[in-house]
Image (cartoon, coloured by chain):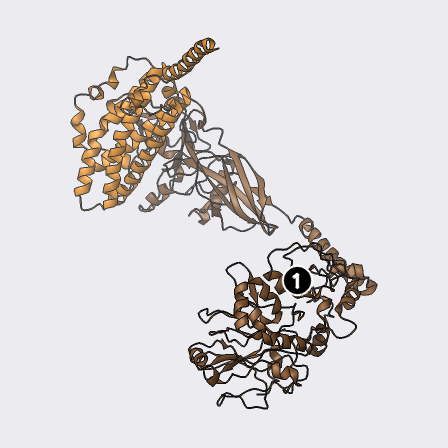
Amino acid sequence: MPGSIRPVSVVWVVLVCLLFCSRLLSVGAAPICTNAQAGCHALSLANLFDRVIQHSARMHGISNDLHSEFEQYFLPSKNQIGRVSRNCHTSTIFTPNGKENAQRMARQELTEVILKLLVAWRDPLWHFHQSIAHHHDFNNFSANKALEMSDMVHELRKGVEKVAEKMQMMGIISNSVSSLASPEALLPSDSAEWRLMKDYDLLYCFRRDSNKVQNYLKILKCRIVPEHGC
Amino acid sequence: MAVFSSSSSSSSSSSSSSSSTSNLLLLLLVSSLDWLSTRGSVFVMDHMTSSAPVGPHFTECISREQETFRCWWSPGGFHNLSSPGALRVFYLKKDSPNSEWKECPEYSHLKRECFFDVNHTSVWIPYCMQLRGQNNVTYLDEDYCFTVENIVRPDPPVSLNWTLLNISPSGLSYDVMVNWEPPPSADVGAGWMRIEYEIQYTERNTTNWEALEMQPHTQQTIYGLQIGKEYEVHIRCRMQAFVKFGEFSDSVFIQVTEIPSQDSNFPFKLALIFGVLGILILILLIGISQQPRLMMILLPPVPAPKIKGIDPELLKKGKLDELNFILSGGGMGGLSTYAPDFYQDEPWVEFIEVDAEDADAAEKEENQGSDTQRLLDPPQPVSHHMNTGCANAVSFPDDDSGRASCYDPDLHDQDTLMLMATLLPGQPEDGEDSFDVVERAPVIERSERPLVQTQTGGPQTWLNTDFYAQVSNVMPSGGVVLSPGQQLRFQESTSAAEDEAQKKGKGSEDSEEKTQKELQFQLLVVDPEGSGYTTESNARQISTPPSTPMPGSGYQTIHPQPVETKPAATAENNQSPYILPDSPQSQFFAPVADYTVVQEVDSQHSLLLNPPPRQSPPPCLPHHPTKALAAMPVGYVTPDLLGNLSP
């Protein structure tokens, strides 16, 4: 009997080890958890997308509110669009302008577009917040919203990068997205033209771009992981 | 003629500002435009009112699904331009720095509409519209510019229906779950449009619409609708984070009528009726049938105090004489025959059985006849004793059964009944304890024992004061010292007591024995002077007719013995209100009653008992109003009788 117990226990231990090892392997070295402790667990892609989309929706809402508030200070005219002196600084980024165009675009390209947009707005929003905070015309509420907006762009960009990493890991998009490494390289050289824009124009442009980001993210999600919510 | 698009004929919920009379004209004109969404804002008109003549202008541009859009114009006040083709629509799409004005890709002159299809629609790109005449005259001061995402008004949701969720317990209100489908034109599935919905409802034929919170799901609950009322519900939607609503959908009507909820009330009434009937039947059964068994089952009798052999009637107020008579053994030869007859037919009356000894063995009985004796005796095999007295009940040959309730017939002849316990903190300090009788009792302790000590009463061994036995002391050996009522037995319990007893003049016992017949009670009277209690022997009284005018009275006043006889005693007594033993001369032939009545407590916290009126004035009771026990009832003195006692 003792003789037979030992091999049985060894086999049992081996089985247990296999189980654990397989579990560990299946989880994989999720890039999402690299900076966290070992106890973090990877989220599903759908979950990540949902979070990012929620974030972008909120960002768009804030930009909408700020834009409406601005319209109260500036002469409310239905034709404000015509008053935009310059085009938005992000108009150089090629973005799909329609549903079909967006759906036809490759996922990788679409992801790149989203990231480009988010990167392009990091600095301008920060300066916008600074100018708002020092302007005595606006109350603290607007200044807080502007700060929140600039933070959200930053967070959203990180979130989209994580989504892209996960997609790369899952093989949905190819790994040749070099833009993820250095998004700043995406911007054209004359990216400083945003400094010449007035605050109101900045707001208008950002409102538009945040809507674009929200739309693209939603299209991506419903294309890749069309579970609940599409 | 100004042509304004106003609320369409399909919807009546328009709360827009366009309620001018021109709307009526427009209604006729745009009756063919049923598919038009409700237009609340005629901003173009507002814009044009600033100038005097209203020129051609765009009324509105709308996109339904963010893929195409339409624009409508009106000639304004320039009627000469109302003919088709007089006005042309040009648009500028600012997607490149060098874009050009282009003409409308698709006209619909009948409706004065310009339709931009998918190929010509670009979102997020500013469009500017112009109205030009034949000679390229631009009629608008400003271009009408917009971006497509800002002019989206989604179609109304479809398939609106409702289901009943629940009805409140009161039956007055209910909740309804409304669900619908998103507009088919909006591509929600691809994520191209994110729509949020708003439900409004109102009572039918009223117009105070109540709007629920906007939310992006395709179902919502309406709470608190009232039963019986008819409600009208419709829904509209818009893009998230945008401001322009689409048209309202067609209304759906909700009504829930009263459900015959008799079900809930019905059982209640039935139950009530049945309950009342049942109670009535019960009452009838009880009242009419008067069956004793039934009565016993339904209305079990309340157990009354029962002493074996005694009619409970006597125990009630006011019949103490008879009670005492019975207890004293009078009547028909005692309770032995009385008791069984009385309770023969009441099986549920339980008596505590006591082992009864042979009546013949008088001595034995002396020792074991009473409960107190049994208590004092060491455990003896008494199984052989049968309780003849308590014939009715089952006999328990238990040693320690409570025997107080079983009356031993042999003890009739004794006339003593100690029914009242005397508080006898006896202090027979020097043992003269005239407790001659008591001596047997080990009760008599030395003065150092400040315990309640009883003086064993008369030597009547048969003085069966079985009903109550006052435990006056517990011997170290374990035996229990009882009150003087039981006297003689005690003597056997401890030898020490006997020693004491001897000191106390045993001789008197003999004399006392003779006097068993007579009724003797011992009362202890507190000596107001602090001499405490003194017991008075009734020896003299025994020999002579009781001087105390208390026929059959169980109480005997105990005169405080002459202090001179026991100066030491009195001195000692002064310190404590304990009973002082009598002087040896006063032979205690008569048994000392175990109980006495405490009349009052004096200032020194001494208990004042009832001294009987004596012929001989008490030795020292100057300021103690001796209370004569007039017509002192034998045995019990109930509180309400206290008042009868004349001081």
Q: Chain of mark 1?
A: B
Q: Is residue B241 left or right of residue B420?
A: left
Residue B62 in sight from this viewpoint: yes
Q: Is residue B146 left or right of residue B437?
A: left
The quadrant holding residue B303 is: bottom right
The percent position of residue A195, horizontal first and vertical second, equals: 16, 31
The percent position of residue B74, horizontal first and vertical second, equals: 40, 37
The quadrant holding residue B367 is: bottom right
- What shade has chain A been given? orange
* Residue drawn at the location 45% of the way across and 8% of the way down: A3
User: Taking A162 as reference, is B390 above or below it?
Assistant: below
Image quadrant where one finds the C terminus of chain B: bottom right
Q: Nearer the viewer, residue B570 or B138?
A: B570
- What shade has chain B been given? brown
User: Taking B177 as reference, is B461 above or below it?
Assistant: below
User: Taking B447 as reference, is A178 above or below it?
Assistant: above
- Residue type at numbered disc 1: Arg
Q: Which residue is mark 1?
A: B403
The percent position of residue B5, horizontal first and vertical second, equals: 44, 40
The quadrant holding residue B4 is: top left
Residue B104 in sight from this viewpoint: no
Mark 1 neighbour class, 10 Å CA radius: few under 14, some 14 to 19, many 20 or more: many
Image quadrant where one finds the N terminus of chain B: top left
* Residue drawn at the location 39% of the way across and 14% of the way down: A17
